[in-house]
Image: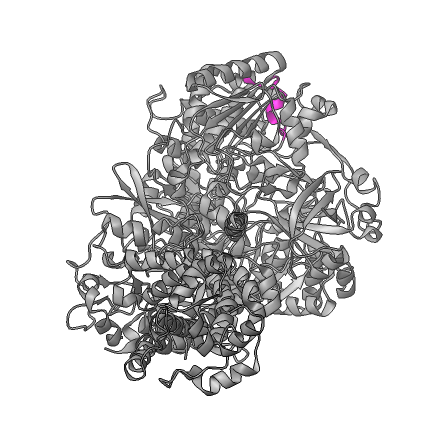
Amino acid sequence: MTNHLGDIQNSKCIFIIGANPAVAHPVGMVHILRAKELGAKIIVVDPYFSRTASKADMFARIRPGTDIAFMYGMIRHIIKNDLYDKEYVKNRVYGFEETAKEAEQYTPEVVENITGVPANQLIEITNMMARAKPATLIYNQGLTQHSVGTGNTRQTVILQLLLGNIGKPGGGCNILRGHDNVQGASDMSNLAHSLPGYYGLAEGAWKYFCSNWKVDYAWMQSRFKSPDLLHKNGFSVATWRFGVLEEQNAKNNAGTMIRGMMNIGSGLSSISLTDTTKKAMEKLELCVIVDPYFNDMGAIADMKNNLFMLPAASQIETSGTVTATNRGTQWRNKVVEPMYECKTDHEILFQLAKKLGYYDELVRAMGDGKGGFTWPEDATREYTQAIRSIGLQGITPERLKAQSENWHMFDPKTLKGSGPFKNEFYSLPWPCWSEKHPGTPVMYDDSIPVSQGGMGFRVRWTPKTPDGTSLLSEVELKGTKSGAKGHDHITAANVEEITGIKLSDEEKEKVKGKSWSTDTSNILVEKAMQAGLCPYGNGKARTVVWEWVDKVPKHREPLHSPRPDLIAQYPTYKDKDNHYRANIKYESRQNEKVWAKEYPMQLLTGRYVEHLGTGTESRSSIYLAELAPEPLLDIHPDKGHDLGLRDGDMVWIYGTTGLRIKVKCKFSTRVAYDTASMPYTYSGIYQGESILGRYPKGLAPYAVGEGSNTIISYGFDIVTTTPETKCTLCRIEKA
Amino acid sequence: MKKIVILSLVFGLAMVGAFAADSQIWGEMRIPNILSYGQEQSLKLGALFTMLQNHYFGKIFLAILVLVPLVFFVHYKVIGPKVFSHEGKKVYAFDMFNRVVHQIAAISFIVIVPTGFVIVFGDFFGGGTFVRLCKNLHGIFTIPFAIVVIPMFVMWVKDMFLHWDDIKWLMIVGGYLSKVKNPVPAGKFNAGQKTWYWLATLGGVLMIVTGAMMYFLDFKIEMLNNITGLSQIDLLRVSAILHNVVGFAVVALFFVHIYMSIFAIKGAIHSILTGYKEEEEVKILHSSWYRKLKEQGKV
Amino acid sequence: MSEALNARGLNRRKFLKMTAIAGVAGATSALGADESKVLRPANAQELKEKYPNSKKVRTICTYCSVGCGIEAEVVNGVWVRQEPATDHPISLGGHCCKGADMIDRVRGEKRLRYPMERVNGEWKRISWDDAFTKIGNKMKTLREKYGPDSMMFLGSSKVSGEQSYYIRKFAAMFGTNNIDTIARI
Amino acid sequence: MTPNTSMRFYCDESRCIDCHGCEVACKEAHHLPVGVNRRRVITLNEGVIGQESYLSIACQHCSDAPCEQVCPVDCFYIRADGIVLHDKDKCIGCGYCLYACPFGAPQFPRQGVFGSKGAMDKCTYCAGGPEDTHSEKEYQLYGQNRIAEGKVPACAAMCSTKALLAGDATSVSKIITERVLRRGSGRGASESAMWNAAYK
């Protein structure tokens, strides 16, 4: 989120596309409802009439996978009717012309044809959204899980940039993230393409982290099969399965197949192609699953040997930080000691590292460097002091604990503290540049000084585009003393020039060769703030990404499109080899056959408020299981009658994976005639057969059912390999 | 007979099993229930039941409990019982089957009716274990009655149809208002007995059904909802109202039946124990039957 | 209402001991029932805690990314009651059904209790030592035989920031970038 | 005594999002058996665009409590603060309170082999029962007595959107009135909307 939940109350219009906060973030929903009470309009664009939609002033039913076209329709209308914030665009946005040019073709009629949203409704929504100042945009997995997922998310930002809503209280682009610490896991970059803090995998990043970890870069290189592998993306959570199953990918993976897998608390059945995961796991020579509950993949995959289940302590049995969707970090206190024989996740890692011979290196950065450390405080300090790219250095365990003990001193709407905390925002949303910095509840707000949480857009890529245009902002940050308007990010080389502050020799020595994100003395950051400047620069947001296939977002039909007639005009990407080490099909899959002929229905997936992720935890709770004991397929009554169904009948759903699942249907007008919807959060039944026998005695969850991911269609995002779970075709028959 | 008993028990248990399925009253069925609240198309059965139960049911039961015996007491004192010779010849009226069936029903009633009163006046007894026990007995002793109610219906139904005599009988209130032993127009069963018969069998079945519904509460028979067009909670409310209203009649006539057999006609109870009625009693109180028996030469 | 009171003469003593209510959801008037049947705020003496000696631990719900606060009452190391953290700035005590059920972590019966290994299709209980030795040896063998890239590590969005950082570090030091998490999707 | 000092629940339909937080909060607080739902969220007009809404329902602690009127063993009692409670030791499980209740609040756990119903269970407004406050027996039969601790009922305290309000009628209607005024339109917080009376 660029803003935070309480800030939504400042909004005059809330545009929710591909998100269902009423179900996924019930406590976040209250802020949306409070905003509504204060007069904000709520617009929900979704293929599914969700519980969130029931609270909306306007609901538009969109065809899945057409969000880019829809938002281009809005952008075109905004530009044609001069509804965009010209001053803002001029000062802070690069690439307006390209966006306007691309938007040209998306007339309301074209958009209606692509998305299914009536032209007049599009116009009404656009007017509602564009005339409200500020307006916020909320999205979620409904936008990200597409082959064009990155395009979708870029498009939301472009829309908000044109309306001048980014960097304003009550505005912003707000993704509501999923799990409790999913933001933290991203920030720590448990990601195949980056080291912690999004530093990437380049040599500089590795060297920076090696120095943080107090190990030699050469030693680190020696750990890898060859030094060049340090800089190559690994397999992602979606593509690793192809590294087990498809020989062709070995050449992308240092000449080997994946033979072992260690899964520390990841819900794998929440990813599409469950059957592929199952087959991959069955081929593994070693599979270790660390989980407080019995991870359902341990039963779905019928592994006879080589499967270890290690009982992890849950997060209430250990202390540590947790980063919420608003980038805010909270201290989570241990409530009880680990139950039964459970061990904490770090303890398990440490024990294994001992066996593998690198325990000393692993913990060297904590405490005295010789294994004498206090968990988690030393680890907290280690990571916050290392991750400066997003400004975690101001976060300390002491500050977080003090906030936790005094959380009543913070205002729910602004997160601003009072009394001893009057210079802090609750949970110190990053960037929190120093121990004196209050945190940043609203990002990119250039109307307040950096020292109070203000900032411009980051000069991330380069201060100049390839064609020589400046990417620096045209407006100065509030409180700037040096007179610099837009400026490059602060490095040892340019700090004196940009800030106009002279560094002492001692300081110069400390920051030599460093930039704001690698300077652990924090001098560069302090100097920037002293001058009222933002450490990472003050640039323009770019709507054009010249390195990518789609320089501006483009509508592309999903791989399995219900509108084969549109494929020729809006084809998907070319097949992509070595995409997170796997060869991924796009075009060849889309053109394999006319999928829509065989599979005429679209399947939407979501979840129930009772269950999260794979439901491994929540389905093991007796009360939650009682509330949502089984998955139900929402199907339109008319469609149901056409298929010869009665409400409550069991049906087979056939997917483009060639597999089928069996669920109970429920007649509901939440879905359109040609769509059906079901939750993905179940397991325990696989292709109509119970697999409860594979659970250890007494550990099968209370609520069992068939999960949708078995039949979710193939398809991955072009940049991130996020599975395309939201555009699935299927066929439904009475069981 | 044994078979029937076993079958009924099995049936009963199976029913319990079926009822143990999902409950509707607390689920979606509550939606129509709440929607109808305070709305015009509502049957307002909840309000009706509350009003009746709060103000009338207890009072009416109390009235029956007090007034009916009081009337009989006065009758007994003023007009007195009919006394027939127990020394004379006897007429064989009820065979073994009749008697067994009747006795089972009788025992059931002897438990059901007083326990019913205990439930109605539960507050008088202070609730708790005793009343709960009575509630359970009330239910359990329905089982024997449920078993015999159909045989009872079948064995006597041919004698129970309305007859010209019954009108005449009713005109003179069965002759109970006079001390004179004039022959009273009646067949094997007089109009009073017939009324009791119909009430005990048909009314009894209704009591069983409504009682069972209330007892099992969250049973799941969609058919019932479809046939009646009522939501389950309203079905329960109707059951409660019917159970009470029919209960008034059953209890009142049950008292009459006991009074007649024990007090009003001295020794009449022996006929259902032994099967034999006094010839004089038959001659006077069942004159038409007596004539018929005579014609057939059975007396 | 007073009618209702009088009618229950038998129980009067019993229900009069019901004390009071205070500070209700912004509704401030606190009520108690006493002999005079006049409602008044309960005083501190009349209010008594169920777990007067409990330790109150402030923690955060582990389900979704909203980050709702929880106040856990702990007696002798046992979590006895989950209290709403009504003064938490994000949730104000609010919870969805999952958050309200957090205490099920310690009450539920479905937790994994000890390490298990699947041997010939059967689940076998093993000791931690055995588990670490077996897993460690196997990982070593794979690393030596096929190279570190023969392992895939999957992190979690459910572990703490520190643990998450250490998972990334663990994989890097194992020698591979084959580390990813559900945070990607 | 004025009537609006009595304790009330109010569920703001425009806030309730069917998250079931109140239900589970109640169940965990009182450790209820599966199948006994003192509180339940219902959906009205499901899937009808523009009309769908949700409502959290439990015992509304009516002033004219129909359950109390119909109970044959008089196991109900109404506290001076309007909370309707009952004595499980007295209750015979007859079900009359359920027939009378417009909200379906009374619950009957299945007990004996013949499907007989145990003592009725319903929302206590987290005020326990007639047993000694905080006694083991009170907890077993009725759950927590949060009122005696000066705490809000668990359901309302944990309501995710603060749709469910608990408190004395005056304060609750004040909150609702404020919300309605802010919204500028919609339903006011009339006495009947507060479920002041069940059958009127």
User: Left or right: A189 with respect to A122?
Assistant: left
Percent across and percent down for residue D103 are: 44, 67
User: Left or right: A494 with respect to B88?
Assistant: right
Does the magenta run of residues contain D78? no
Numbered marks: total: 0
Q: Is residue D51 visible?
A: no
Residue at the spot 33% in from the left edge and 63% down from the top edge: C25
Q: How is colour applied across the structure in the image? A: one colour
- Looking at the image, residue D86 lies above or below residue A724: below
Residue at the spot 37% in from the left edge and 38% down from the top edge: C106
| In-front residue for pair B236/C181 | B236
Q: Is residue C51 visible?
A: yes
Percent across and percent down for residue A69 are: 72, 56
Identity of the residue furthest to the bottom in this view: B171
- Looking at the image, residue D113 lies above or below residue C12: above
| In-front residue for pair C73/D182 | C73
Corner quadrant of residue D128: bottom left
User: Left or right: D180 with respect to A670?
Assistant: left
Image: magenta residue range: A223-235
- Looking at the image, residue B179 lies above or below residue A563: below
Percent across and percent down for residue A500 are: 45, 45
Residue at the spot 44% in from the left edge and 82% down from the top edge: B174
| In-front residue for pair C163/C27 | C27
Percent across and percent down for residue D66 are: 37, 72
| In-front residue for pair A313/A379 | A313
